[in-house]
Amino acid sequence: MRWQPHAARLAAAVTPRGSGWRELVATVPRHRFVPRWWDTPAGAKYQTWEVHDGAADPEEWMSAAYTDQTLITQVAGAHADHGEPGRVVTGRPTSSSTLPSLVVQMLQHGDVYDGADVLDVATGSGYSAALLAQRLGDNHVTSIDVDPYLVEAAADRLDTIGAHPKVLTVDATGPLPGEYDRIVSMVSVRPIPASWLTALRPAGRLVTVIANTCLIVTADKTDDGGAEGRVEWDRAMFMPTRSAGDYPPGARGLFDDVWDIDGDDVTQGRYPVLNVARNWSLPSMLEVLCPGIEHHYEQGDEGRHTARMVHVDGSWARATALGEDPPVVHQGGPQRLWDVLEGVRTYWLRHGELPLHGARVRVTPDGVIRLQRGTWRGTIGPISGPEGTG
């Protein structure tokens, strides 16, 4: 099976000319790291998946592996390696082989250089560890994941291409093995684990995405044990860290409880109803100001739009309108979620943009992130209530 032409085309598509990563993408056989994956059948319900076996359809395998797309390898703790043909599962993805352009993007933000010791956070399929090991050598790369099976499978697949970096079962939010010049995370976190700052060498750099946002943070270690940097202008989203086989349910189960009830407050909104989850910047800003919101949106046959929001503290909001009309808004619980959203939209209209991308970043030694752009300031810490100021 000739995979090299497919890999060469992928490399040309996801790396700029002259990039040091182009040859590596062209020579690392990504299909070896995703022999099986989960995909959503046509017309299936939300978060429904069926297994695909590469060996059973080599043409599909090459197409999937060498297209710039994320391949879901694990759902609700069930790995595609163990899925029976025709098996269908439901749930939230818990591991994947990230689309190659994003892997390269994160490595570029990490400013990885020859001789650097790099920690690859979230081994996943092992593909990012393979790129790093081929560039830096096995002794300079450590890759960690919380899931023992992912670590075992990735190590075996790395071995098939002659790569042998350290691949360890480690909870990335806890103590880390060793010290590093670069920490590049293929999983999202909130806040920055303090152990990353401890393991980062002087002037070392960390790169990560903030959980439930599209914000890529790059920060260099400072003498006080913290780090300074910025929110990059690029955007990305990664699965958040987890400590078990699946993620906790979060607030999503609250939708049923408040689906059509009357609110404590019933008002008319200022702006048309929108699907917040289809936007990049709005949910990211909300996550900074009021972390933990879940969203649901639907459009009826008669042009009626309904957006729903719930929060883990029991707060909820529902806005309904015909077309572009101002919505009727029902809200309940300790926070007024729709008011928070409208405040963000007002800021956006007044300033022409939201202040997150390009913001200066200061990470304290305990991992709390302080953001500043112009007169705006925000804080990203552990989820315990509303954060940030406008």
Image (tube, rainbow, N blue to C red):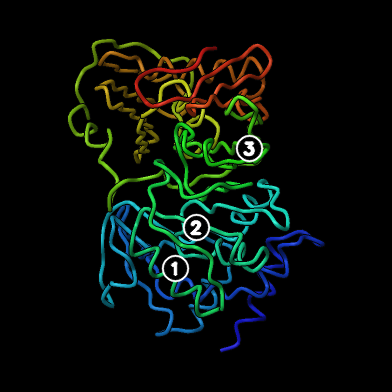
The tag on residue 143 is 2
For the residue pair 73 and 20, the one nearer the viewer reads as: 20
| Residue shown at the point (19%, 34%) measured from the top left | 256
Q: Residue furthest bottom?
A: 1
Which mark is nearer the camera, 2 or 3? 2
Circle 1 SS class = helix
Q: Sequence order check: which comes first, mark 1 or mark 2?
A: 2
Q: Quadrant of residue 287?
A: top left
The tag on residue 228 is none
| Residue shown at the point (68%, 61%) measured from the top left | 14
| Quadrant housing the C terminus | top right
Q: Sequence order check: which comes first, mark 2 or mark 3?
A: 2
Q: Residue furthest right?
A: 18
The tag on residue 154 is 1
Looking at the picture, does residue 187 appear above or below residue 228?
below
Residue, disc 3: 218
Disc 3: CA contacts within 10 A as few (<14), some (14-19) or many (>=20):
many
Q: Is mark 1 in CB contact (under 8 Å) with mark 2?
A: yes
Which mark is nearer the camera, 1 or 2? 2
Q: Amino acid at mark 1?
A: Ala
The residues tagged by marks 1 and 2 sit, at their Cα atoms, a distance apart of 10 Å
| Residue shown at the point (61%, 41%) measured from the top left | 201
Looking at the picture, does residue 173 appear above or below residue 311?
below
The residues tagged by marks 2 and 3 sit, at their Cα atoms, a distance apart of 19 Å
Q: Position of residue 238 (x, y in %)?
A: 48, 47
Q: Position of residue 365 (x, y in %)?
A: 52, 27
Q: Is mark 2 in CB contact (under 8 Å) with mark 3?
A: no
The residues tagged by marks 1 and 3 sit, at their Cα atoms, a distance apart of 26 Å
